[in-house]
Amino acid sequence: MADVYESMLSSNVGRSLLSSLNLPVPTQLERHSQAQTSFVTGNVLVGAAPGGRMAESIASTLKASNATVQTPNNGSALAEIQAAGEKAELTLTAVDSSAEAAKFKALIFDATGIETSEQTRELHNFFHPVIRKLNDCARVVVIGLPPESCKSNPRQQIAQRALEGFVRSVAKEIGKKGATCNLVYVAKQAEKAAESALRFFLSPKSAFVDAQVLRVSKAKSVEADFNWSQPLKDKVVLVTGASRGIGEAIAGVMARDGAKVVCLDVPQAQEDLQKVADRLNGGMIAIDITDPAAPGTIADTLQKEYGGVDVVVHNAGVTRDKTLGGMPEKLWDMVIDINLSSEERINEALLEKEVLKEGGRIVCVSSMSGIAGNFGQSNYAVSKAGVIGMVDAYAPILAKKDITINAVAPGFIETQMTAAIPFATREAGRRLNSLKQGGQPVDVAEAIAFYASPASAGVNGNTVRVCGQNLLGA
Ligand code: NAD
């Protein structure tokens, strides 16, 4: 069935009609294009609570953009921000409160200095005067201290945990304009390592990542001459399930970022797989990942033909939906084996043979079903919750080898998989999020590329939802 709602949204008359019926009319999301030279442009307002530790890191990050960086014309931590700006040789201008029309492309607030619940008032002080002055597709980023790192001061731990409620509520209030709000918890001494996260959340690359909480831990930061536009130059990246859908988009974004991409899919998909690999000037492995010989074959191929691998993206996955009472064991086993067990076996082979290089990255694709569960998807939800478990279990182990493991959990993404859902269910899945639309495969790919970057060494053990703040949740 033709997508009636989507076609109405593409005309002005249709949009007005839907709006008058109080139906969701989403803002078209801005996405990254190669023509963009700066991760953020326009007015960016920076504020902080007293005692914050992020001012220098924010200033040096913004120095690399062509944004017009502004500060509130009063505020408790103004002096610290101005000093950090001077140190980074960043031109800061005080916001002109008489300029009624002035709008912001991004609001950044350093909340790391908040130590008590009373001090959460700093959030109100900074955001209240400006939250209605956002451009379409603006970015709001709040930076906090990981609550679990504040155990010696329970009041501070409580106040830092409270930031999550703020970010999730603001995201719901600004989503209609295509704007997002995210929280980055930056550990002590990880301030510089947070640059890749700040760039990602401020940029159009995070278009469909909304109301998320990311943790950055202490790690080596990249050299000053790091190539941010080709972060994966000279890196070898394996992408499973790369012949179509989200996997094809991941392979494309990795190649854009400079990587040699090795595309993997089942032998039946070889023709499409070859086309993707050829287009990206990459390599190809046609194998079923559940084949008992697959882990060994993949490890040997990567070692012999590419000298190892830097990034592994476990994207291949299937659904076989049935309510539990009607589900044959065959469908249970198949989904668990493809979506979870084969990934464990491949990881083990790559790590045991040291094919995954030091400083490597493992990125997994979970799902909203793995977080919230889903009707008729007990098998799929087990596999995708298990993927999150894999990230939790391996992150501390791999950190010792400077390897990171993280996951994305996509919500409703426009692919062949979701196009096959009946119309009414599809529309509900697509619209029930703060951005009132489905995501694109590239949105998942951009989040994966962020994890994969050498600049994201401090980003380990995270599961970030790429779901536009899906309103259905656990
Ligand atoms: P898709 O069906 O279009 O692509 C999946 C790919 O995996 C296919 O090319 C398929 O051939 C490959 N594959 C399946 N079994 C394999 C095996 N045994 N060995 C090797 N390759 C195999 O699906 P998609 O929508 O692009 O999904 C990609 C990933 O994203 C999956 O893990 C899926 O569970 C997850 N996901 C998708 C959505 C969505 O809305 N589309 C939402 C949440 C999670």
Image (cartoon, rainbow, N blue to C red):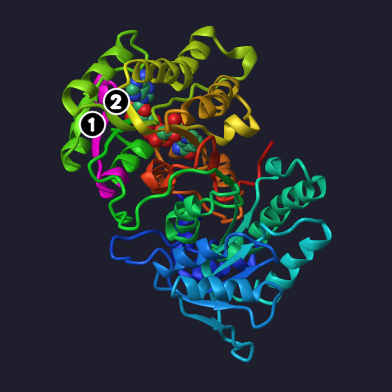
Mark 1 belongs to which amino acid?
Leu
Q: Can residue 34 be seen by looking at this rendering?
A: yes
State the residue position of label 2: 265
Mark 2 belongs to which amino acid?
Asp
**415 w.r.t. 351: above or below:** below
| Element type at mark 1 | helix
The residues tagged by marks 1 and 2 sit, at their Cα atoms, a distance apart of 7 Å
Give residue 178's position: percent from left, percent from top: 54, 62
Circle on res. 273: 1
Mark 2 vs ligand 1: CB below 8 Å: yes
Quadrant in which the N terminus is drawn: top left
Going 59% across and 83% down the picture, which residue do you hit?
A: 95
Report if the CB atoms under discs 1 and 2 are less than 8 Å apart. yes
Q: Nearer the viewer, residue 392 or 56?
A: 56
Give residue 101's position: percent from left, percent from top: 57, 86
Which of marks 2 and 1 precedes in the sequence? 2
Mark 1 vs ligand 1: CB below 8 Å: yes
Q: Nearer the viewer, residue 40 or 286?
A: 40
